[in-house]
Image (cartoon, grey):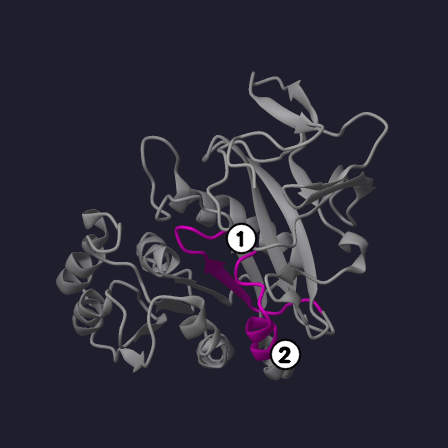
Amino acid sequence: MNQGGGLPGNSPVSAQTSDGVARYADPPGESPIGKEGVMWLPKLAFPGDGVQATVICDPAPCRRRLPAVLIAVALPVAVLAGCSSSAPVNAQGAVNTQGAQILHLTIDSRLVHGAMPLTLVTPAGGGAHRPLLVFLHGVVYDNNSQLTDQMFAALHALGPSAPDIAFPYGDASYWVNSPDAAWASYVLDDVIPKALTVLNADPRRVAIGGISMGGYGAYAIARLDPGRFCAVGGHSAAIGSLGGAPASTSDVIATATANPKLYGHAQLWLDVGAQDLFIGTDQQLANALHIPLHTWPGGHDFGYWNAHWGDYMGFYAHALATCG
């Protein structure tokens, strides 16, 4: 797999936009397939957006750090509308979506200085005014990494109480605001409003959670707007200077210790594998918040997380159903 900023094979045309940043545009007169898992298709209009959008299909959960300017187009929004009706694919083959629909968008954001992908999932049957779950990925994963059989099965099992899900991309940012990019603000001000609009989801019922780096990020973001979320979940939250996590991630423990009610009315969840190196710091956060730490056998890996999607979805669905 190509690790640089470009794409293997015949590269798409690089176009200069008004802000002077190079963006990728469609190759003239062709629709190449197989470039870093990206399929370029003709431009389509997404219903209700009033703009033309480029359909981008990136079904494979690639474990790579993407460039800051990501396989984007010189348009505000790029939308996937079906993606050849093919299911996501992982290392084990095609993923069973259980009838859920997947939309791949691109948000061109000034907050993170580039165009970033956003994957949206709406459960089988669709329908407006569902609650929204924002789910943040870990440090070596991306917005498609959680599109697994187990996640879709757990979502399907919820039936009519299943939420829509937004999976944003956050690089290796730990989902915090920094001098380089405002990732927390990006989630609050760009990702959530876009997901609510595109999915016609219920803005009064929003939850946020994540795995590893994303588990820390969920708690770090929710404290910035404590009245906004019905639930906050951290799954193997990467907290403290272990396993490459920055020491600054311990700040959530300090803020929770100072103010255990920091997250307002939100229902809170933490879980971790019994063999996970973050079990000590996750226990400290749970103690500070006066909540239980759910612990099961396992480590810091997809085997553990995939085994507990049913628990995760059950928590979020119950919190969203009883919110407000």
Residue 97: quarter of image: bottom right
Q: Where is mark 2, residue-wise?
A: 156
- Say which amino acid is labelled 2: His
In the picture provided, is 237 more to the left or to the right than 204? left
Q: Where is mark 1, residue-wise?
A: 143
In the picture provided, is 59 more to the left or to the right than 237? right
Instruction: Tell me if mark 1 has few (under 14), some (14-19) or many (20+) residues whose alpha carbon lies within 10 angstroms of its own.
Output: many
Seen in the picture, residue 273 relative to 35 is either above or below; the reply is below
Instruction: Tell me if mark 2 has few (under 14), some (14-19) or many (20+) residues whose alpha carbon lies within 10 angstroms of its own.
Output: many
Residue at position x 80%, y 59% from top?
85
Main SS, magenta region, reads loop
Residue 213: quarter of image: bottom left
Residue 63 percent location from the top left of the image? 49, 51
**Looking at the figure, which quarter contains the N terminus?**
top right
Residue 226: quarter of image: bottom left
| Magenta stretch in the rendered image | 127-154
Q: Is residue 113 magenta?
A: no
Residue at position x 48%, y 30% from top?
113
